[in-house]
Image (cartoon, rainbow, N blue to C red):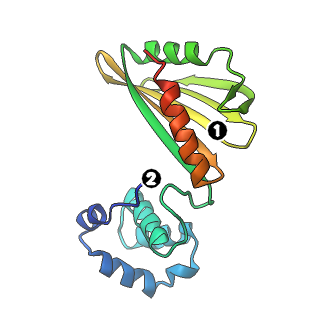
């Protein structure tokens, strides 16, 4: 299962204790605000965007609005990764070979066509699944002879489904060489 947000890292990054942040959240009535509204108020306090998001998620977990791994819309995302020998183009080719001919993943059919895009620093592959979830693969050059592949399965309906998908994808990417 995904772990809760690390409070110690937030305290270190922001220079405030968790108790001070809880007082701040109480003072702005955060229990009655949306994720976006809370993050906006944190940004107005000078908390940089990424930390404002993390702090908001930590608070939402603290009050029981969401569980670890859950998005603000109630859905869940998982990710798995693998380091491959070679360039990011070779890693993309290996991924495309692996998924060639796939009509489904873990008994959920692919909807439409998968899409590939390339930038100077990234190679991306995406597909939508019939259940409304999607799979996103990002590949980058980690070192001159190694490529990193990160796979995210997004918009999953439950924590249980997320863990099933995590196990599926861990096994699936073992086939990459």
Horizontal side of residue 85 vs 12, given as left or right: right
Q: Residue at x 46, y 73 (%)?
A: 41
Name the element at disc 1.
strand
Q: Residue under circle 1? A: 134
Q: Residues within 10 Å of mark 1 (few under 14, many from 20)?
A: some
Q: Residue at x 32, y 66 (%)?
A: 7
Q: Residue at x 38, y 73 (%)?
A: 45
Residue in the foreground of this view, choosing between 55 and 121? 55
Looking at the picture, how far across and down is residue 153, in whole percent? Answer: 57, 40
Q: Earlier in the sequence, mark 1 or mark 2?
A: 2
Q: Residue at x 52, y 73 (%)?
A: 64
Q: Quadrant of the C terminus?
A: top left
Q: Is residue 74 above or below residue 93?
A: below
Q: Which mark is residue 14?
A: none
Q: Is residue 5 above or below residue 135?
A: below
Name the element at disc 2.
loop
Quadrant assignment, res 50: bottom left
Residue in the foreground of this view, choosing between 73 and 156? 156
Residue in the foreground of this view, choosing between 107 and 15? 107
Count every numbered label the image shows and give the total. Answer: 2
Looking at the picture, how far across and down is residue 87, in whole percent? Answer: 38, 15
**Label 1 – label 2 distance at C-alpha:** 19 Å
Give the number of the mark in front: 1 or 2. 2
Q: Residue under circle 2? A: 2
Q: Is residue 152 above or below residue 19?
A: above
Quadrant assignment, res 90: top left
Horizontal side of residue 156 vs 110, given as left or right: left
Horizontal side of residue 88 vs 31, given as left or right: left
Residues tagged 1 and 2 counted as in contact (Cβ below 8 A): no
Quadrant assignment, res 17: bottom left
């Amino acid at each position: 299962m995904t772990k809760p947000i690390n409070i110690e890292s937030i305290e270190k990054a922001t220079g405030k204790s968790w108790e001070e942040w809880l007082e701040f959240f109480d003072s702005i009535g955060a229990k009655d605000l949306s994720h976006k509204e809370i993050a906006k108020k944190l940004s107005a306090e000078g908390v940089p965007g990424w930390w404002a998001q993390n702090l908001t998620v930590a608070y939402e977990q603290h009050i029981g609005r969401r569980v670890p791994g859950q998005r603000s819309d109630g859905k869940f995302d998982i990710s798995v990764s693998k380091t491959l020998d070679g360039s990011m183009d070779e890693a993309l080719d290996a991924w495309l070979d692996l998924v060639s001919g796939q009509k489904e993943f873990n008994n959920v059919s692919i909807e439409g066509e998968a899409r590939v895009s390339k930038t100077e620093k990234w190679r991306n592959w995406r597909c939508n699944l019939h259940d409304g979830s999607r799979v996103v693969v990002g590949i980058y050059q980690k070192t001159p002879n190694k490529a990193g592949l990160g796979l995210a399965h997004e918009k999953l309906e439950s924590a249980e489904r997320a863990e099933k998908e995590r196990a599926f994808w861990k096994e699936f990417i073992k086939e990459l060489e």
